[in-house]
Image: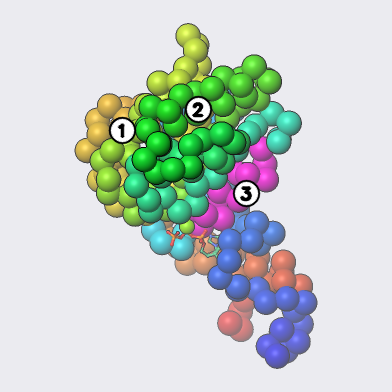
């Protein structure tokens, strides 16, 4: 197999977001810094956009690993392609709601929002900060969903939000956000990750080859 030819111990370019291979280009470092700042400073909402494959999902994993689980409770919604009610329900479930009604007809948005509010307050009382990370948000076109996210930001104390929302998605996400001005203005931190330039591409290839056990030389590639 090609691993032995190149002197590697594993495949360097598997198409999965494995934090072990994270290459901290200047823009990835900046993205991670802003995400961490938003979380640590209790900002309401943080948004990361970037073209497909630029490493957003990988950054979400790296961020997850960086956050101390004694301090942060993190709910990850990796596929938000669902109705607004289902999405809220998914948030509640990821935050640990155990007693939500299961029959569709019995589930009301207010009930789910109440449950989320209680969970956020419970986390706060336990000295934990809640982070809700929504990946692949560019697939969401339902305006109600952005309105619901705004409702989540209404859970706040006098001086801080009870949760930090992190939205990640391809650049089309900007269009959807622009349609909800009230939510838009609550996004405290934004960053856009662009394509790698030539030097970053070379650094990226060398880095992945090194992590996979190779020497990292790219002259012959
Ligand atoms: N900075 C990086 N370091 C290491 N690998 C990276 C980096 N950026 C992207 N990759 C790799 O590229 C591939 C695609 O990354 P990822 O799935 O995170 O992209 P994405 O921005 O979430 O894409 P999409 O918009 O399609 O969801 C993965 O294999 C990932 O590991
Ligand atoms: Mg992704």
Quadrant of image for the N terminus? bottom right
Which segment is the magenta one?
A: 55-67
48 vs 213: above or below: above
Q: Which residue is mark 3?
A: 62
The residue sitting at 27% across, 49% down in the picture is 141
Residue 151 shows in this picture: yes
Mark 1 Cα shell of 10 Å, populated few (<14), some (14-19), many (≥20)? some
Identity of the residue drawn at 65% across and 68% down: 208
Give residue 213's position: percent from left, percent from top. 76, 73
Give me the C-alpha separation between circle 3 and circle 1: 28 Å
Tell me if residue 44 comes above or below residue 132 in the rendering: above
Identify which residue, 203 or 15, lies in the foreground: 15
Q: Are marks 2 and 1 in contact (CB under 8 Å)?
A: no
- Left or right of 13 in this view: 6: right
Asked if one can make out residue 138 in the rendered structure from this viewpoint, the answer is: no
What residue is rendered at 56% in x and 50% in y?
59
Residue 151 is a magenta residue: no
Foreground label between 2 and 1: 2
Identify whether 218 is placed above or below 109.
Answer: below
Instruction: Identify the main secondary structure in magenta.
Output: helix
Of the numbered discs 3 and 1, the one sitting upstream in the chain is 3
Give the label on residue 115, or none.
2
Image x and y of residue 135, in percent: 46, 49
Secondary structure under tag 3 reads helix
- Of residue 182 and residue 217, the one placed in the foreground of this image is 182
Q: Secondary structure at mark 1?
A: helix
């Amino acid at each position: 197999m090609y691993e032995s030819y190149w002197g590697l111990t594993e495949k360097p370019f598997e198409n999965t977001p494995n934090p072990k291979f994270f290459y901290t280009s200047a823009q990835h470092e900046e993205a991670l810094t802003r995400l961490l700042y938003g979380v640590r400073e209790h900002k309401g909402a943080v948004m990361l956009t970037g073209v497909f494959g630029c490493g957003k999902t990988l950054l979400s994993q790296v961020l997850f690993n960086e956050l101390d689980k004694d301090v942060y409770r993190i709910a990850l919604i990796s596929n938000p392609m669902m109705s607004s009610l289902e999405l809220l329900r998914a948030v509640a479930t990821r935050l640990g709601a155990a007693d939500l009604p299961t029959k569709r007809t019995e589930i009301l948005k207010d009930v789910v929002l109440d449950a989320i509010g209680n969970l956020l307050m419970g986390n706060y009382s336990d000295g934990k900060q809640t982070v809700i990370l929504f990946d692949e948000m560019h697939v969401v076109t339902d305006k109600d969903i952005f309105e619901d996210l705004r409702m989540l930001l209404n859970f706040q104390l006098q001086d801080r939000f009870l949760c930090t929302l992190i939205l990640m998605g391809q650049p089309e996400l900007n269009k959807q956000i622009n349609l909800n001005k009230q939510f838009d203005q609550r996004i405290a931190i934004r960053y856009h990750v662009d394509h790698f330039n030539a030097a970053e591409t070379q650094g990226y290839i060398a880095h992945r080859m090194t992590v996979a056990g190779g020497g990292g030389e790219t002259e012959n590639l």
